[in-house]
Image: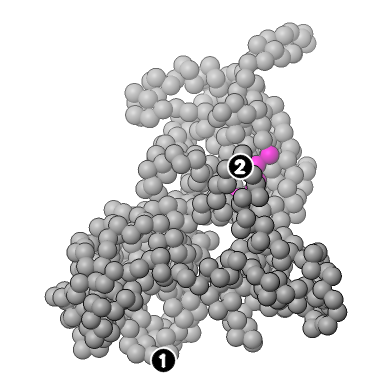
Amino acid sequence: MQHEVVMPKMGESLQEGTITQWLKQVGDKIERDEMILEISTDKVDTEVPSPVEGTLTQILVQEEETVEVGTPIAIIDTEGGAPAPVSTPKAEPEPTPAPAPAPAPAAPEPTPAATSGGDVTDLVMPKMGESLQEGTIVKWLKQPGDKLERDEMILEISTDKVDTEVPSPVEGTLVEILVQEEETVEVGTVIAKITSGSGAVATPSPAPKPEAKPAPAPAAAPSQPAQQQAAKTAAPTQTVTGSTFEIPRKSNSGRFYSPLVRAIANDNKVSLEELETISGTGVDSRVSKDDLFNYIKNRPAAGSVQAPVASAQPTTNVASTPAPKPTQASAPANYGSNVEVIPMDRMRKLISAHMVQSKQTSAHVTSVAEVDMTNIWNLRNKLKNSFQQREGIKLTFTSFFAKALTEGLRQFPMLNVSVDGTNILKHRNVNLGFATALPDGNLIVPVIKNADGLSLTGLQRSITDLANRARTKKLDPNDIQGGTITLTNVGTFGTLFGTPIINQPQTCIIGVGAIKKRPMVIEANGHDSIQIRNMMYMSITYDHRVIDGMLAGQALAAMVNALENVTEDNIIL
């Protein structure tokens, strides 16, 4: 089965991209989501993953060549099956998306529109960040049968970092929706089909969404037999040592493990033997991300797993197992009439999972220092009007914080690191992420690339631009990936200081609190005096696996010193 790889759309206004480097060559075996090439646009330099597993059989666009978005750039043979209905001019006789003409409109199945003639293009779940492996369909803006223009928005998707609209890569007609709203699929999964050219489209039969998910209903009501089954799995267990930490895509038992699950298992040192014992809730009993996080949370012991053993003993230990939890969660009436039950939305679930993962991964330690912000306070008040007239943007305290942070990392570069297994990765450039509040109450962390090379004005321009685009959902994928350290302003609403959670895979996050006027004892020329100063707390939360207290304290002191010594004479806008 031949599958086309096309030049992806890496931003709303981008129409073309350049092949920078092919990471794979013709004849190479490729796993799904394995990086196969690097591309460059005027906004994004990124790697492109393979949408399928197979063999690279043809490279259609060579390195340094520039082509339009949607242009086929390579062919992957998925080894078996009928030829894929891809947009290849030579394959006109082969596309056979005609399973629907025979079933007349009376067929109740959610079979989408049938096509007649024309090229068929697969629309796949896009990769919206370097660490993201899946996305959720929030809303389809178009329905089967609708005409589409190239770059017209056809659906909204959500990940744990980005909520964005996805444009059509080609002009044509939407003929089939393969993934329904609120469903989550892996990056590269085909989610819809678009026919282009002169293809005629039959009237799509309505997809009965409510009936599409009847299966989970019985599982949600654990009956007595279900409890008996739980009792069996809760029977006496024996400890099995897990020693295989290289998790394959498919185990010897035939079980599939997604790239996301493998990455989480690797980060948390979960062995293959442990994964094999987890009862998966995904398709074909696959272990989902939530299954794995639940297992890690209740993990019996490091390096060992509890494998169920057949036993005829009485099931008196059932009460000590987590089996009854679904029964409690499915009975909100037990909370009482004075409690409103609010289910977490998908974004909140993902944030929750990532926060727990970070706490389980890094040894968090926080140190706090005081900063005298009086000089910067007065200087900003003096310069802010002229700065806004000249630059067209406001001069905020955040740019001063960012500049001081980069100065601290210049003196102590071992804070600008991340961890990969037992290796410490030292980053040459400071890619500064800064937490930005969104209108819906969630947070996103845009990244200023090469922040250590920017002036105060350059930092302020980047902060303003990224924050505005974050709040209007116009960030490009490259804007939220590649961060090496994060800055968060916990003082926006008056908080004095906080102990923020590290943004994995980084190892350090800087927090700044509210600026408050306080009486301070100031020493000058050997004499003490009490003055009213604008004071602020600054915190550094670091991963004690690779950053010791002395290094963190020295770096924090350097940042404080950079802030306190800003004057009108030495500031460089």
Q: Is 302 situated above or below 285?
A: above
Instruction: State the residue lying farthest toward the left.
Output: 198
| Image quadrant assignment for residue 336 | top right
Q: Is 291 situated above or below 460?
A: below
| Image quadrant assignment for residue 551 | top right
Circle 2: residue type: Ser
Residue 479 is labelled as none
Q: What secondary structure characterizes most of the magenta part?
A: loop
Q: Residue at x 38, y 66 (%)?
A: 209
The quadrant of the rendering that contains the N terminus is bottom left
Image position, residue 566 (x, y; %): 57, 24
The one nearer the camera, 126 or 234, is 234
Residue at which label 1 appears: 80
Image position, residue 393 (x, y; %): 38, 30
> Callout 1: helix, strand or loop?
loop
Image position, residue 535 (x, y; %): 64, 21
Residue at which label 2 appears: 337
Nearer the observer: mark 2 or 1; the answer is 2
Q: Residue at x 60, y 81 (%)?
A: 255
What is the span of residues highlighted in magenta in the rendered image?
A: 499-503
Q: Earlier in the sequence, mark 2 or mark 1?
A: 1
> Callout 2: helix, strand or loop?
loop
Q: Is residue 138 magenta?
A: no
Is 115 on the left or on the right of 505, as rendered?
Answer: left
